[in-house]
Image (cartoon, rainbow, N blue to C red):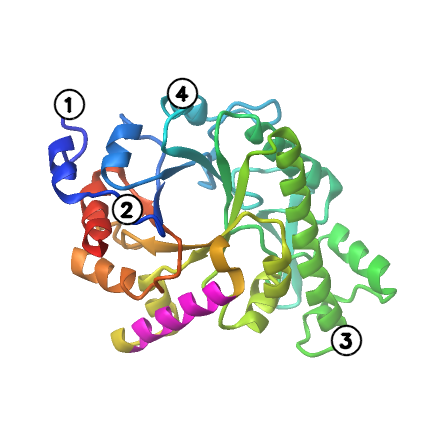
Amino acid sequence: MNGIWLYSLSFLLSVALTAAPERSHEIQLRNNNYPVMPDSLFLQTAGIEKILVRVFSDDEKNGGLYFSNSMIKAVRPVLDDWAPMYVNKKVELWAWMGVRYFSWYKDPGYLDRTWQDGQRQVIPKLDLFNPDVEAVVVGLFKQLAAKPIKGILIQDDLVLRHDEGFSNWGKAFFTRATGMNADERLMSQKGSTHNQAWKRLKCERVMQLLGKIIQTCKAVNSQLKIGMNIHYETPLAPGQARAWYAHDLPALTASSLDYLYLMAYHRQIKKELGLSETANQEYFGKMATAALQSFGSRLVVKLQVRDWRTAQLIPLSELKAYYDLIPAEVERVCFAAADPEDLPLIAQIINARL
């Protein structure tokens, strides 16, 4: 492969065996501009059964979409270029797609408003209460579903945070649904009647849009699988997930999602929660167990392969320690967000389990 990757087929053959039938492994690539993509044979040899390719970017200057469509000009048709490599192959190709965090999308009429410090401000996220936005989002997923792929992973931006949703469309939605005046101060006041109703409505809105995306994609391709990224707080702190993300654990569990991808990123968790290493491992184990209890065989645990801040590869011993904390009953593990050159490390993790 012209030295592009730091591995060879013979090396992978020496460390990777056939994965145990009760667990499959996936790789989610963090970029989409690699000179060469790993082909099906290399992935199979490493013990990988699914590859997820990014088809969006939220970069303010250079972001956009990376598959041909009739609605938004593609930056590069990455998915269209690479999809033929995986057609009729054992390794599944999935598209990893965003929903609303497109900082390059400049039309203020399509953008949401946040309420902070007594003021509304435009934010670089699509307004989920705007019916025109819904048409764009659902239309893009419909066209994506027609590509020669096996599944779609919905990004973790299908959320409405506690200070979001305050567009005119969002306020009108609140008034129609509750009969109360859309007062931002009361809607933001924790524990108020307005606030409780607003949290419920935002959860319902997220699930409504998710349902439409799934239904539309399945109408195009009934065999297509749909997964969605789930924040790590959700299994252990469902009340916080409702308030922070408008993600309702019972509703997600009851949804028609084929897979729920738990973002079990151990370094991110440790930093955000201020945990010691011992406490972090204890939290990780409890989180994965709780997610398994909620999602069962639909659970995919995502392991962080690189440090978000430095982009450095996480050492084998550290990655293996957290892999080993995943309950044996978990049927799927996804290594995210990785590069093709990380396959030797990933192969060692998979091999060490056998």
| Mark pair 4, 3: CA separation | 54 Å
Secondary structure character of the magenta stretch overall? helix
Residue on which disc 1 sits: 2
> Residue at point 26% right, 49% down?
311
| Mark pair 1, 3: CA separation | 63 Å
First-in-chain label (1 vs 3): 1
Location of residue 65 with respect to 266 vertically, above or below: above
Location of residue 59 with respect to 22 vertically, above or below: above
- State the extent of the magenta-drawn residues as a range: 279-293
Query: Which of the 4 image quadrants contains residue 276?
Result: bottom left
The three-letter amino acid code for the residue at tag 3 is: Thr
Element carrying mark 1: loop
User: In the rendering, which numbered label is found on residue 84?
Assistant: 4
Q: Are marks 1 and 3 in contact (CB under 8 Å)?
A: no
The three-letter amino acid code for the residue at tag 1 is: Asn
Coordinates of residue 298 in the picture (x, y in percent):
50, 53
Residue on which disc 3 sits: 193
| Marks 4, 3: nearer the viewer | 4
Task: Determine crowd level at label 4: few under 14, some 14-19, many 20+ residues with C-alpha closer than 10 A.
Answer: few
> Residue at point 59% right, 64% down?
249
Location of residue 302 with respect to 30 vertically, above or below: below
First-in-chain label (2 vs 4): 2
Residue on which disc 2 sits: 19
The three-letter amino acid code for the residue at tag 2 is: Ala
